[in-house]
Image (tube, rainbow, N blue to C red):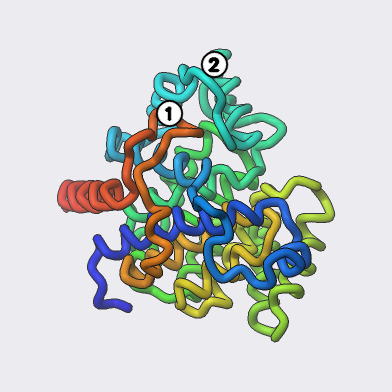
Amino acid sequence: MTGLDTKSRARGCLAGLAVGDALGRPAEGMEPDQIVERWGRIEGYVADTPVGSDDTEYALLTAKALLRFGADFSADNVADLWRDEVCTQQGAFAGSGFSEMAAIRNLQRGHRPPRSGQHAHGWSDGLAMRVAPVGIVAAGDPEQASRWAVEDGLVSHSGEGIYAGQAIAAAVAVAMTGADAEAAFAAALDVVPVDSWTARCLQAGREVVATEPDWTTAARHAVARLAVDRYYWADLAPEAVSLAFVAVLAGEGDFRETVLNAVNLGRDADTIAAMAGAVAGAFSGIDAVPEEWLPAVAVAPGVCLATTKGMHPMEVADELCALADELGSADE
């Protein structure tokens, strides 16, 4: 799919994230056998009114930071944005995860990065779910995407939570060039420490897809041995990110199949599908996103993050492409 233009890929990336979020939301917290018992295999929206959640709105927040700060995108500047437009929010942060709420409380208490991201939930998938915009702006440069992911991550995460975010950011950056699923996975693995929990889970998932015909069950069990058995909650970054890449690799370049693979894995299904959708959308482009899924890619309601209310993923994707061009021109 090398003939697609950058705008199509950027739109596909953010649309993929948003539809994955909306498709997976009803299955969040469920095990694969529970999904089968209730719906069989999920093949489309099962909610009456499919909408995204914190995954989409936090990704839009990262996009807002990129568009505001450009080449000056840094942990300190992102923290200032959070402090001014997130920490001051009145009312509940509907659907916001443990890691984000802990970071918000730390910022409200005056802590700065990296201290703001040092808390009991710094290993969650909350960074990985929001860094797709970083990959769009750093298209073709996974190392830059990885560096920006660290800057974003220091505000709210530490350790494995940051490694997992680096993996997704690098994968999107490579996918934005038209590279296939294997190349995107290789880029993800390349930017995380080889001895990390995230790397071990990524490799376990890759091995299952390569060797097991019944990869859905096998992948869950293989990753569980490294991740799930050690922690109860479904938002564990090494687990969720590795399952997202299982979905991407098993989808073999097909956007629809990739996202449905992710949804039907259960656990943190909305985030897993959002991450898989972002990577697959980047190498597939917007035209690969099924038309019947696009209504969920709408103006953000701001139910989790009021500062994102009114932002439209497609418009944001176009603005991120313009920023990438601007930064690229400045480097020449």
Which residue is found at the position 43% from the left and 34% from the top?
302
Using the image, determine if residue 148 lies above or below residue 85. Answer: below
Question: Residue 267, percent across and down?
Answer: 70, 56
Question: Residue 245, percent across and down?
Answer: 57, 66
Say whether residue 119 is visible.
yes
Which residue is found at the position 43% from the left and 60% from the top?
16
Q: Quadrant of residue 60?
A: top left
* Mark identifier at residue 10: none
Which residue is found at the position 55% from the left and 18% from the top?
111
* Residue 74 vs residue 55, the one in the foreground: 55
Circle 1 — which element? helix
Disc on the earlier residue, 2 or 1: 2
Question: Residue 25, percent across and down?
Answer: 59, 52
**Count of all numbered marks drawn on residues in the image:** 2
Question: Residue 1, percent across and down?
Answer: 32, 78
Is 313 left, or right, of 184 in this rendering? left
Which residue is found at the position 47% from the left and 40% from the top?
58
Hey, which residue is sitting farthest front in the picture?
48
* Residue 110 vs residue 304, the one in the foreground: 304
Is 129 left, or right, of 102 in this rendering? left
Say whether residue 144 is visible.
no
Label 1 amino acid?
Ala
Label 2 amino acid?
Gln
Q: Circles 2 and 1: CB distance less than 8 Å?
A: no
* Mark identifier at residue 306: 1
* Mark identifier at residue 108: 2
* Residue 142 vs residue 130, the one in the foreground: 130
Q: CA distance from mark 2 to mark 1?
A: 17 Å
